[in-house]
Image (spheres, grey):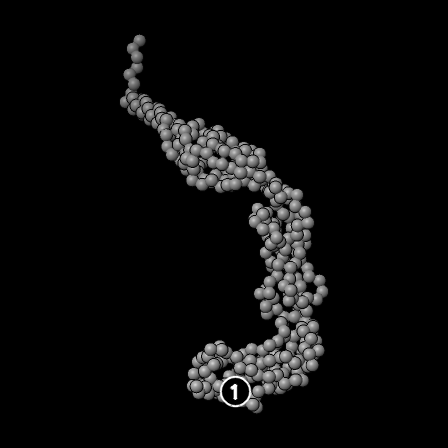
Amino acid sequence: MSSRKSSPRERLVNVIIVSLVTVLIWMWAAGETRETEPAFVDLELVSPTEGSLQITPSKIQTVRLEIRGPRRAVEAAADRFRQPVRITAGTMGVPADPGEHEVELARIATELLANWRIPATVLDADPMTIRLDIDSLTEKTTRIVAILPSSARTTGRVEVSPETATLVLPGDLKDLENLEVEARITERDLEGRQPGRRHQFQVTLQLPEAMGPAGDSIRIDPATAEVNLTLDANEEELALTAPVPVQIAGPAADLDGWMVEVNPASAFLRNVVLRGPADEIQRLRDREGGLGVIAFVHLTSDDLLQMIEEKPVTLWSLPAGVTVTSVDGDATSSPRIPVSILKRPSS
């Protein structure tokens, strides 16, 4: 019985099938060809639970890896390493025990490839090793206290929210006792704040200055707190019964060459009204109606050369927090004072 001859169509199909199988075999063989290629990775090391360990350094950037394996595996490894890799201490060859450790980066990369089920080998790493300093951390709850400038006067309760903060301390500081966190208000914070009203401040929390450099290793959570307070409006006015003398001020070297006099009619300022904290105003009252208050007219070298005829008061000798609200009925603290300036005859 003679065999049936294949038709041209069947022969064409056979050729196509053989060609496809050949291509597939070639592609498989190409994919399985072993290659060695470099890859680069950034590593981030984190503690098993948030805040339980302090790892230094916690980020290892641009580690160069030499990877060998089938082309597909090498490409898959390089693709995974293009993104930063986050590793939990205690896994992938990263220790979790407190202390100093020298870790082989090639071993970490090998563990990662095994975890990803990528059949490739890490031949080398640059740097080869990294020294890690691992410290156990302790959390402690402490009170937040508001610290105000000595000049600040408040009425009612100074409120801090939240009232407590959590300190995250390294192992060598875990036994610290009676440590408070400060919400410090500065004089600049209080500038322009109206007395008698409730004010709110968002303040960065800090440790007492006495902690020194040791405080740099302590983390405060939260980082800020809200302080609410009412500035004391306990201010009073005082109309001075005694006239306020006016004096000339300026560089002594400049004034030596000139004869300067205040117009006698303006040598004393009358009906000067002061405003300030009640305790300071009371002290002025006790000084026989404000004796000791002086108004100064400051002259510059240019003022002398131009022999100006008047200049405003620029300075008052007053206690802290006390200001001039009016002079002789005018709402000013800088009344203009007539002066006489003459060149001193040379001897």
In front: 243, or 163?
243
In front: 120, or 162?
162
Q: Residue at x 45, y 41 (%)?
A: 61
Quick one: label 1, few (<14), some, or many (20+) residues within 10 Å? some
Q: Mark yes or no: residue 31 visible.
A: no
Q: Which residue is mark 1?
A: 261
The image quadrant that residue 247 belongs to is: bottom right
Q: Mark yes or no: residue 165 visible.
A: yes
Q: Which amino acid type is shown beneath numbered disc 1?
A: Glu
The image quadrant that residue 83 belongs to is: top left
Q: Residue at x 49, y 78 (%)?
A: 252
> Relative to residue 270, is residue 279 depicted above or below?
above
Task: List x then y, in percent, for residue 293.
Answer: 62, 79
Task: List x then y, in percent, for residue 79.
Answer: 42, 36
In front: 105, or 295?
295
Q: Residue at x 56, y 36 (%)?
A: 99
